[in-house]
Image (cartoon, helix red, strand yellow):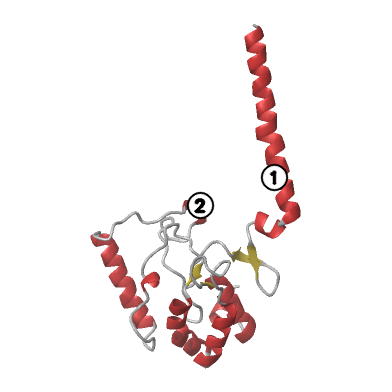
Amino acid sequence: MSSLVIALRATVVTLVLTGLAYPLAVTGLSQLLFPARANGSLVTDERGEAVGSELIGQRFAQAAYFQPRPSAAGEAGYDATASGGSNLGPTSAKLQARARADAERLRAENPDARGPVPAELLAASGSGLDPHLSPEAARWQVPRVARARGVSPERLLVLLESEAEGRTFGFLGEPRVNVLSLNLALDRQFGRPLSAAATK
């Protein structure tokens, strides 16, 4: 009986410490020190409405916006509740067919782009939710976006350079650009395209 009481006491203490006190302390501390990060790193538009997270990629299909990497997260892609890759290997016929179809679509949508389609626009990330592109993959899309918005490619290149992020701490990772932030910067500087405004 005494062993049972000790076990119950240890269970209750452990539940209170690890199930209540610790989570509440960590949540409170994170809300106090970095509330934006603790609440999902949400990104807002010019009206202050949350339009996404800087940590999670999302689909942009209109010609007037930069497009992200493809996504294998969920049935339609970009599903934050189903993060994951396709798990298809490099010899997979299904993966090769999807990449070929995407390459043909991208070439048709970007007739003025120079060079081959960047590999990252054909390959999904391991999470399926990577919000970043390399500056090179974004530059490849500049002629299409400039034509759709009626602005010069040079103005878009200046905007792209201003939105580009360097290596973390100067040496970790690669230079990158957040696609959602870049597209919001497009709308701020050049206005929202009519087709996008009509859906809001």
In the rendered image, is residue 193 in sight?
Answer: no
Residue 71 placement (x, y as % from top left): 42, 62
Give residue 3's quadrant in the image.
Answer: top right
Residue type at mark 1 is Val
Say the numbered circle drawn on residue 125: none
Residue hosting label 2: 81
Residue located at (67% from left, 54% from top): 38
Give the mark nearer the N terminus: 2 vs 1.
Answer: 1
Q: Helix, strand or loop at disc 2?
A: helix
Residue type at mark 2 is Thr
Distance from Cα at disc 2 to Cα at disc 1? 23 Å
**Dot in front, 2 or 1:** 1
Other-residue count near label 2 (Cα within 10 Å), few / some / many at <14 / 14–19 / ≥20: few
Give the side of residue 48 with respect to residue 143, left or right. right
Outermost residue on the right side: it is: 32
Residue located at (51% from left, 78% from top): 65
Q: Helix, strand or loop at disc 1?
A: helix
User: Which residue is more in the foreground, 200 or 25?
Assistant: 25
Residue located at (40% from left, 59% from top): 72
Say the numbered circle drawn on residue 26: 1
Residue 90 placement (x, y as % from top left): 27, 61
